[in-house]
């Protein structure tokens, strides 16, 4: 299997922009007339997620199921998230499982096998990991990723306002997020692809563009997973702040996530037919794709 970094960059080139579509099932925002209420029928999660994938696949470099929004539905919700990873991968689409795992030893091995391993695991292409228990938090994930051509997305500088509570604390003369980036920098080489980027991703929030630029200096080969674009308030230029301009004149170096802005555009919850709903969703994805593509060439 090709390295994760190569597959992700190829997908971004194919659709024309580094757009990641988040799959975040919010029952109150879903069009329950079309999909059903997942609180009563968990299969609604699969119907909704599948339709979202199909409507946005022409515009998305990858898909990111948010596991924390599937787990409240119990084992059926967990199974639905796994099914959506399988459905996406069967169509040759890249998946990032947003699980934010973080542990050590045999527990970390279990999490790595569950997220990146074959059935009954998710067999996702990449998984998000919380590194704040230390470098040994990442070891099992990195080993499996290297063996299976997968990726690992490490929380470094997240997009939420509360990130400053810990990530900005001075440690050894630098903020903790800088020290975290320095910690993972030597780990990027085993996941390096032919494209020149590593599948050891850094999560770098679009709401902190200056920090993203500083992260790029520390992690020159890491792909970035960028949350915070769209609904959370950041524009395309801020989202691409940590990307690198290639020989083609275009910014490269990761993917930018949009979840609610694509899955729940205005009027989608009241669409009378699946065709109408798909058109609204596709238009939202196309708009985000074009916005990012335009910013990447400025």
Image: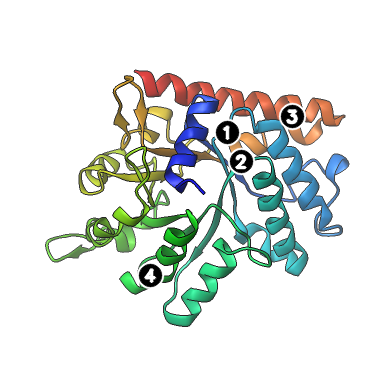
Q: Which residue is mark 1?
A: 60
Query: Disc 1 versus disc 2: distance between alpha carbons?
Result: 9 Å
Q: Nearer the viewer, residue 164 or 62?
A: 62
> Could you tell me if the residues under marks 4 and 1 are in contact, i.e. CB atoms within 8 Å?
no
> Could you tell me if the residues under marks 1 and 2 are in contact, i.e. CB atoms within 8 Å?
yes
Residue at horizontal 87%, vertical 41%?
A: 33
Total labels: the figure holds 4
Q: Nearer the viewer, residue 196 or 183?
A: 196
Q: Which residue is mark 2?
A: 93
Q: Nearer the viewer, mark 2 or mark 3?
A: 2
Q: Which residue is mark 3?
A: 267
Label 1 packing within 10 angstroms: few (<14), some (14-19), many (20+): many
Classify mark 4: helix, strand or loop.
helix
Q: Earlier in the sequence, mark 1 or mark 2?
A: 1
Q: Position of residue 6 (x, y in %)?
A: 44, 40
Query: Disc 2 versus disc 4: distance between alpha carbons?
Result: 26 Å
Query: Looking at the image, is 265 positioned above or below residue 5?
Result: above
Residue at horizontal 49%, vertical 41%?
A: 7
Q: Nearer the viewer, residue 70 or 108?
A: 108
Examine the image and state in which quarter residue 140 appears. Answer: bottom left
Q: Which residue is mark 4?
A: 139
Q: Position of residue 273 (x, y in %)?
A: 87, 29
Q: Would residue 130 be seen by someone viewing this image from the given angle?
A: no
Q: Earlier in the sequence, mark 2 or mark 3?
A: 2
């Amino acid at each position: 299997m090709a390295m994760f970094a190569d597959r992700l960059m190829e997908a971004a080139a194919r659709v024309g922009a580094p757009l990641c579509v988040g799959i975040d099932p919010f029952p109150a925002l879903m069009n329950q007339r079309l999909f059903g209420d997942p609180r009563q029928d968990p299969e609604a999660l699969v119907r909704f997620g599948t339709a979202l994938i199909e409507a946005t696949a022409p515009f998305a470099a990858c898909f990111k199921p948010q596991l924390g929004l599937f787990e409240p539905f119990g084992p059926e919700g967990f199974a639905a998230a796994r099914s959506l990873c399988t459905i996406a991968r069967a169509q040759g689409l890249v998946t990032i499982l947003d699980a934010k795992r973080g542990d050590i030893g045999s527990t970390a091995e279990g999490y790595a096998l569950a997220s990146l391993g074959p059935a009954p695991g998710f067999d996702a292409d990449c998984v998000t990991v919380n590194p704040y228990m230390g470098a040994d938090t990442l070891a099992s994930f990195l080993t499996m990723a290297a063996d299976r051509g997968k990726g690992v997305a490490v929380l470094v500088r997240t997009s939420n306002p509360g990130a400053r509570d810990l990530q900005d604390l001075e440690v050894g003369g630098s903020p903790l997020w800088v020290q975290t980036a320095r910690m993972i920098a030597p780990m990027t080489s085993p996941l390096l692809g032919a494209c020149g980027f590593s599948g050891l991703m850094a999560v770098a929030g679009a709401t902190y563009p200056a920090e993203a630029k500083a992260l790029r200096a520390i992690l020159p080969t890491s792909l970035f997973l960028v949350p915070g674009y769209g609904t959370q308030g950041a524009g395309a230029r801020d989202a691409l702040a940590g990307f690198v301009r290639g020989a083609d004149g275009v910014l490269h170096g990761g993917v930018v996530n949009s979840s609610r802005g694509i899955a729940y555009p205005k009027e989608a919850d009241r669409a009378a037919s699946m065709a109408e709903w798909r058109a609204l969703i596709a238009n939202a994805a196309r708009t985000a794709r074009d916005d990012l593509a335009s910013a990447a060439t400025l």
